[in-house]
């Protein structure tokens, strides 16, 4: 398995200045590489690959001395990032989605550095320092040990705080003992999740809880009319930290519920929710649906199940709320304000989410329902007027 470990980073003032200079040069490389690809296709109908552009990195470092202080791995990471953007663009074109062609980036918004050729563990000094090429040792907080072989390291500046993310490969799974239990899970708004055996997990509603603080912080940003002033930047950073706290609360709740389910059950059956369709059909509840974070919960459920050796199955959620889990009678669609289900045939009544969870369990354990969608967590030089200028020439001219 692959796992990414995120730690707080505490660079000194001098190290911060170096990192900001790296951000600026990385953004310059990204925009120049994007322009080269665009011109090559527009003028010559030639596609330039990432390998072609990586071959120009040594020449750029020789002609622009300010790039000599940046590790080659960092510059290669910029070109890999651009290549991923084009790969996603072509994938969206093939699938009929909104294409979203890669755009030029502003230097003030470039806040990530990627180093992909880690030869050894970058953590040294007994877990108190991390080794960064051409920079040296940087203080950080290792709150949990690394597992597996370090492969990629990313340095991120987010809302005024520095982080280092280390991706490791070959992380050994930690299978839990078998329990022999299956469960169906229905997600909702009144309760975040309801299981077929009667467990109710509360919805923390982090956005509603922090709405007053967010409104005050947003008004503070709006009053700062000068977009380049320090006061506006500080106010915007404070607003971003409020939003970050809301996202952290939402993510931690999803992890907590996913971990609880994985520890209790061998197989977890969830509904295959079409969230964009829900947002379109119920615009009055769009804020609450997005605040719940159902997609995040399903993602973390797969992550925890993979590590624990559990299985996750998705089923079609159609008619699960208005079908009796006792006799199978199907009634009319229930409005969202109706919280109790009452069977018109046998008279059975229970909470509508609990009834839906039992139907989800039944669908997931039947051959027809499980065939809907199953995913096992055990197994995602300047040329003429008709030629594009190479990346080397573009970088060299911008530095002159």
Image (spheres, grey):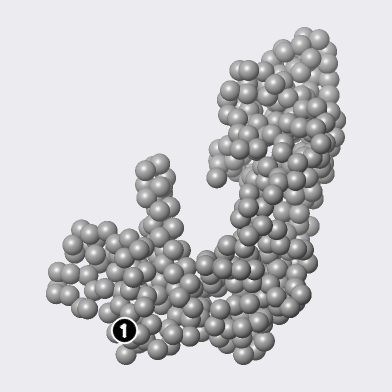
The answer to whether 357 appears left or right of 387 in the picture is right
Residue 228 vs residue 69, the one in the foreground: 69
- In the image shown, does 10 or 360 lie closer to the viewer? 10
Among the 4 quarters of the image, the one containing residue 138: bottom right
Query: Do we see residue 72 in this rendering?
Result: yes
Q: Residue at x 80, y 32 (%)?
A: 178
Q: Is residue 164 above or below residue 204?
A: below
Position of residue 276 in the picture relative to residue 188 (left or right): left
Q: With respect to residue 13, does 386 lie above or below? A: above
- Location of the C terminus by quadrant is bottom left
Q: Quadrant of residue 53?
A: bottom left
Looking at the image, is 75 positioned above or below residue 230?
Answer: above
**Residue positioned 67% across, 87% down in the render:** 12
Residue at 35%, 85% in the rendered image: 62
- The residue under label 1 is 396
Residue drawn at x 41%, y 77% as measured from the top left: 28
Whole-percent x, y for residue 131 in the image: 63, 77
Q: Position of residue 256 (x, y in %)?
A: 79, 48
Q: Position of residue 66 (x, y in %)?
A: 43, 88
* Front-most of residues 45 and 322: 45
Instruction: Look at the numbered disc 1 and give the secondary structure of its residue.
Output: helix
- Residue closer to the observer: 255 or 220: 255
Residue 300 visible in the current orientation: no
Q: Position of residue 49 (x, y in %)?
A: 32, 60
**Residue at the front extreme, as displayed:** 120
- Residue projecting furthest to the top: 345
């Amino acid at each position: 398995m692959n796992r990414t470990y995120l730690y707080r980073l505490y660079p000194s003032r001098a190290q911060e200045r170096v990192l900001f200079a790296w951000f600026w040069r990385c953004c310059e490389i990204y925009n120049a590489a994007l322009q080269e690809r665009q011109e090559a296709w527009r003028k010559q109908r030639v596609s330039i690959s990432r390998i072609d552009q990586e071959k120009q990195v040594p020449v750029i470092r020789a002609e622009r001395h300010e790039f000599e202080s940046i590790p080659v791995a960092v510059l290669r990471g910029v070109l890999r990032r651009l290549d991923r953007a084009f790969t996603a663009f072509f994938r969206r074109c093939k699938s009929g989605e909104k294409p979203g062609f890669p755009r030029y980036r502003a230097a003030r918004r470039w806040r990530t550095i990627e180093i992909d050729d880690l030869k050894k563990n970058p953590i040294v000094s007994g877990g108190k320092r991390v080794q960064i090429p051409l920079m040296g040792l940087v203080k950080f907080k290792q709150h949990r040990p690394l597992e597996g072989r370090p492969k990629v390291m990313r340095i991120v500046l987010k809302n005024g705080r520095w982080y280092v993310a280390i991706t490791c490969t070959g992380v050994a799974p930690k299978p839990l003992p078998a329990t022999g239990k299956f469960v169906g899970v229905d997600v909702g708004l009144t309760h975040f999740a309801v299981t077929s055996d009667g467990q109710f997990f509360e919805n923390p509603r982090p956005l509603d809880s922090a709405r007053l603080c967010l409104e005050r912080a947003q008004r503070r940003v709006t009053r700062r009319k000068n977009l380049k002033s320090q006061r506006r930047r500080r106010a915007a950073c404070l607003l971003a930290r409020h939003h970050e706290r809301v996202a952290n609360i939402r993510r931690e709740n999803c992890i907590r519920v996913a971990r609880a389910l994985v520890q209790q059950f061998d197989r977890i059956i969830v509904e295959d929710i079409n969230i964009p369709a829900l947002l379109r059909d119920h615009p009055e509840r769009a804020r609450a649906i997005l605040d719940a974070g159902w997609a995040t919960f399903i993602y973390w459920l797969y992550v925890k199940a993979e590590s624990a050796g559990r299985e996750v199955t998705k089923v079609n959620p159609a008619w699960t709320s208005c079908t009796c889990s006792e006799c199978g009678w199907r009634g009319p669609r229930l409005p969202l304000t109706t919280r109790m289900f009452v069977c018109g045939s046998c008279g059975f009544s229970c909470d509508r989410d609990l009834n839906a969870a039992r139907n989800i369990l039944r669908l997931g354990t039947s051959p027809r329902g499980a065939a809907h969608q199953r995913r096992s967590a055990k197994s995602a030089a300047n040329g003429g007027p008709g030629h594009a200028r190479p990346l080397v020439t573009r970088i060299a001219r911008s530095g002159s």
